[in-house]
Image: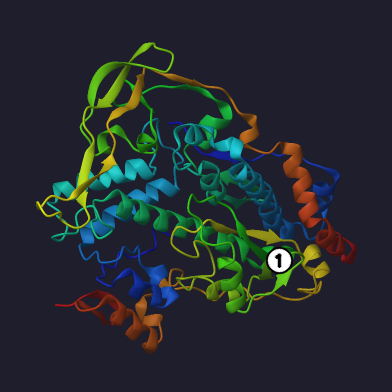
Amino acid sequence: MAAYGIVIRDLGTTAFLQALQESVDRETFIEPIGEAGTRVLKDHFRKKNLDAGSHKSAQRLGAQPSGLFEQFHNATSHQRQGSSSVLSVNHPAVRQRFEGGDIRPVNSGFLTIPAQAAAYGTRAREAGITLAFMYAPDEQGRWRRALVAPSAVTRETGKARKDGTRRRVVIKPSGIWYWLVRKVHQLADPSVLPTRTEILDGIKTGLESWANRILKRG
Amino acid sequence: MLQKKRNLPTTLKAAELAKADAEILELATFSARVSNPAIVQRVADLVTEGVSPQNRGAGEYMDRARFREKMKYFLGSIGYEPETGKAGSLQDLMSDGRLNLIWEMNTKSAQGFGQHKQATTPDVLEAFPCQELLRVGLRREPRPPEFWPTRWRDAGGKFYGGGRMIARKDDAVWSGISRFGRPYPPFDYGSGMGLRAIARGEAVELGIVEWDTPIAPPPASLVDSLQAGVGALSPELQAALLKSLGDGFEIVAGVLGRSG
């Protein structure tokens, strides 16, 4: 069964890490190396999340960003395994984004691609509005399979008028909610993670001054 | 953490829960005003899937949208109906807003607790004795810019180099800035604030600690002591726990359970 998180076991080594691993205090350094490594990952995810370029889909639709890199940040951890530290990002989307590949539907015939802000982050089954399958024109005039809401969902608001009626506001709009596709090919995006060099350099930056004091004591 | 939690149904409102002892909140996978243990258990099961996505097949992983879908199906199957006049509101367990809140709070709490445990082992405290409060996530409607610095200051926090909010990991400010009294994120509902470890060398340069300043590991929480039973808690904490749960619970021979 595929694992959908990412685990980083073998970062390689540097002269600095080798000195830590060969010292009499090597047990002391295992967890701090893990913490330093996760700090590099979390810094990377935080910067990606605060970068406007990471939210293109949401911006295009005028929707609330999903905060995917914030989720990666929160899902990052380290574990001690024997005499080394393993870094992991326990999130189902991180591997797909990093490695790319085809995304195909599992429990239905089509993937649903949001076509408007109201659909972003919402599954078609829980959209809370009647959706009909039909062919609809996209912005280029091509007819494509789609799920369309023929009517908006509204509710009454405000004080009653003299005739007893109340103003109605749209809470779920009509129109094209999803485009239906058989598959999506996602390009690999190595920028999802920092490089191994960045992680190793970050570990050294985080630990160097403290670790050198211990190494000198030993 | 989720596997150790007990599902303790409660009818306290969110505001009342926030006032409860932080350790009591650690004990429960809580969702305000939910007294049906089957619902609470279902939430715990689904959130556990979400924070541990390893070894899940395609289409099987849990995320916020799938959580909403499965919870709505489950609630429908048990005949759940919201109180009169509450349909669609945060008081409606089947509303997107309520389910999103349950998902966000429980997953982020589990992750925050896990990272807190890793950050406070003796060796990590030696290397990274301090941490910084900073923004991790964007919000479409963020709190005012002065909100967190004010809360930080009111909790006794100090500022370093251009307004950075940094403190020792054993400083009471971390619990003080939290709406829930916990020293780890999330610090408030919908908050995008998180933590960044500060290395010993930088902390010394900033004058927060010395090279040999020890940082106390946090005391063992209720979650850690569950296997010892509730009887290991002080009488005061047992009383506070029973009070927060309301009617219908009792502690007998060190074991918490329903009355009768």
A201 up-or-down from B98: above or below: above
- How was the colour assigned to the protein in this rendering? rainbow
For mark 1, does the 10 Å Cα neighbourhood hold few (<14), some (14 to 19), or many (20 or more) residues? Answer: few
**Count of residue discs:** 1
- Residue A59 in the image: state x and y as whole percent: 50, 36
Estimate the x, y position of residue B255 in percent, counting from the top left. Answer: 29, 77
Q: Nearer the viewer, residue A39 or B237?
A: A39
**Please, is residue A83 above or below residue B174 in the view?**
above
Tell me: B173 left or right of A149.
right
- Taking the view exactly as shown, the residue that stands out farthest to the bottom is B235
**Mark 1 belongs to which subunit?**
B
| Pointer 1 residue | B163
Q: Is residue B110 left or right of residue B254?
A: right
Q: Quadrant of residue A118?
A: top left
Where's residue B140, x and y in %? Answer: 48, 49
Q: Residue at (19%, 76%) from the top-left corner?
A: B248
Q: Is any atom of residue A164 visible in this view?
A: yes
Kind of residue at badge 1: Gly
Q: Quadrant of residue A25?
A: bottom right
Residue found at the very far right of the displayed protein:
A216
Q: Secondary structure at mark 1?
A: loop
Q: Name the residue at the front extreme.
A: A162
Quadrant where the image shows the C terminus of chain A: bottom right
Taking B177 as reference, is A161 left or right?
Answer: left
Residue reaching furthest to the left: A163
Name the residue located 38 percent from the left edge and 46 percent from the top edge: B49
Up-down: is A182 above or below B99?
above
Quadrant for the N terminus of chain A in the image: top left
In the rendering, at what x and y percent does residue B56 appear? 41, 37
Residue drawn where x is 41% and y is 78% of the image? B21
B35 and A196: which one is in front? B35
Is residue A12 in sight in this rendering?
no
